[in-house]
Amino acid sequence: MPGKRIARLNEQFKREVTQILRTEVRDPRVGLPTVTGVEVTPDLWMARIFVRPGLTGEDEGELLEGLEAASPFIRRKLGELLTLRRVPELRFQVDRTLERAERIESILREVIPPEERGLGLRPEPDSESPDPE
């Protein structure tokens, strides 16, 4: 049961933090980041919020500085919106999932021959292999 509660809290935090960032945070360093995920600890002590810079290409360092400066404001707004005994401390991190996925794909492109990529095909059996009949 606690797992379901934490999963619901993660989604709720993601929605609410996204809304607060888009409508109420006025720091120009923040811009319009995308909240990609939230991980709340089971004891509600801390919430790790994963963000990606917006389409305008904000600097990641400035984005994190702006989010850290806005953290008390965001936390206070979350306390007003959610009925929790304790609103967790917010820690923002840049989400690196896309970069990792691109790196894995580039490695796979080097390893897998072009004719097999994405087709799920196996190489043709050698002519030397015995005939199954």
Image (tube, rainbow, N blue to C red):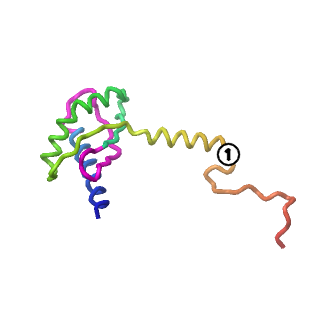
Q: Is residue 132 above or below residue 2?
A: below
Please tell me which residue is depicted at 16% across the width and 52% down the height of the picture: 84
Q: Look at the image and tell me in which quarter the C terminus lies.
A: bottom right
Q: Amino acid at mark 1?
A: Pro
Res 7 → quadrant: bottom left
Count of marks placed on residues:
1
Q: Position of residue 77 (x, y in %)?
A: 15, 42
Q: Position of residue 74 (x, y in %)?
A: 19, 39
Left or right: where 110 falls relative to 58? right
| 29 is within the stretch colored magenta | yes
- Which residue matches tag 1? 114
Q: Nearer the viewer, residue 31 or 76?
A: 76
Left or right: where 102 falls relative to 107? left
> Magenta stretch?
22-47
Q: Position of residue 104 (x, y in %)?
A: 55, 42
Res 122 → quadrant: bottom right
Please tell me which residue is depicted at 24% across the width and 38% down the height of the picture: 21
Q: Nearer the viewer, residue 102 or 72?
A: 72
